[in-house]
Image: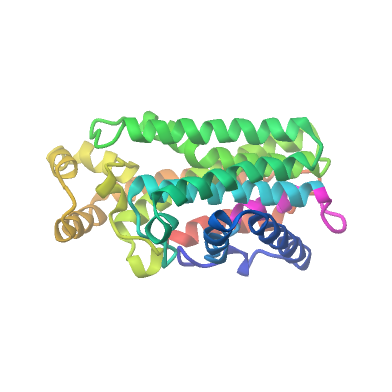
Amino acid sequence: MSATAHPTADVVTAGLRDALRACEARLAAVVADGITEVAMPGAATLAAGGKRLRPLLVFACAPAGGPPADAVVRAAAAVELIHMATLVHDDLLDGATMRRGRATVASSHGADAAVQVGDYLFAQAFAELAGADDPAAIEVLALSALDLSQGELAQGRAAFDVALSEPAYLDRVRRKTASLFAAACRLGAMLGGGSAEAQQRLTAYGEAVGMAFQIFDDILDVTGASAVTGKRRGADLRDGTVTLPMIYAIQEEPALAGAIRGIGDDDAAIERLCDRLAAHPGVVRARDRALAYVNDARGVLTGVLDGADRRSLQLVADGVVDRYA
């Protein structure tokens, strides 16, 4: 499965497919419900598609039995709106011009528009979930949003820090990526009526899958072709985001620290350094670390899940690995 492939191709049952359609309709209505300045670029962001992996997790973690409750659909839409908002803001901060093969909001509409669209999507996520009338659900999403913000701040503070430790990197990934995966799983189980044990297990599953997802994404940044990933190769090198394959490569070859720190924005130099890192044993170590998280996620699924879609969740974990293969 490529980085741009839709993970639901081999995962979605008829019930999940109907649930995702309901979520997509809700997302379209939410994005359209705004002034032109934010509705148009917001609609373009939605039309760019994406894997809809987080809404899928919400639905797969809700106990099965008929169409999903309105609260579950709202939660699925809310987590995707948060994700969309972070992409719009991240692209602005990173200076990215392309996302999923399309122009980013920042490059096509300007920096001010990107800030406004991201803020709008973020606010609409909480408005959408508020309709579920469950304060505990709002708390779950709010804590995840706080983690996202702290992860982004940590990433900015550590720009070009070639001495970044593995624990610091993993904490950043937990906050910036895995927390929303975990929240999606918890919200599905919670609003679907799952027990406290099932909620705890599925939250742990979501965090482990999110950790693996981001590590593989960081590997793809240096190993993947732009035509496959939909992003410029070496984006992390360009903005100084030190990732796990870089950390491992520097540990084994300290001279790489200077090359990474001083890379600048020369396209040819970045391509050469990406090739060097892609062939480095550090990438293999990073892949093994990601696979360990996938195995953790699979292990969680052997316990009590209160009717959550175990098979689809197993296939999602497999798909995270296939995404890199």
Is 18 drawn above or below residue 191 in the view shown? below
Near-viewer residue (132 or 124)? 124
Identify the residue at the far right of this view: 66
**Horizontal placement of 29 versus 85: left or right?**
right
Q: Is residue 303 visible?
A: no
Q: Which of 214/309 is in front?
A: 214
Depicted 277 relative to depicted 191: above or below: below
- How did the renderer colour the structure? rainbow
The structure residue drawn at horizontal position 25% and vertical position 49%, both measured from the top left corner, is 238
x%, y% of residue 296? 56, 42
Residue at position x 57%, y 53% in the image: 317
| Quadrant of the image occupied by residue 226 | bottom left
- Camera-nearest residue between 143 and 292: 143
Q: x and y percent of residue 78 in the render?
A: 66, 47
User: Residue at image x 77%, y 38%?
Assistant: 190
Looking at the image, residue 132 sits to the left or right of residue 231; the answer is: right
- Residue 228 position in % (x across, y down): 39, 68
Q: Quadrant location of residue 270?
A: bottom left
Q: Is residue 60 magenta?
A: yes
| Marker count (numbered) | 0
Instruction: Give the magenta-colored segment's residue range.
Output: 53-70
- Which quarter of the figure is the C terminus placed in? bottom left
Front position in the image: 137 or 319: 137
Residue 229 covered by magenta stretch:
no
Q: Is residue 318 visible?
A: yes
Please provide percent x and percent y for residue 5.
51, 67
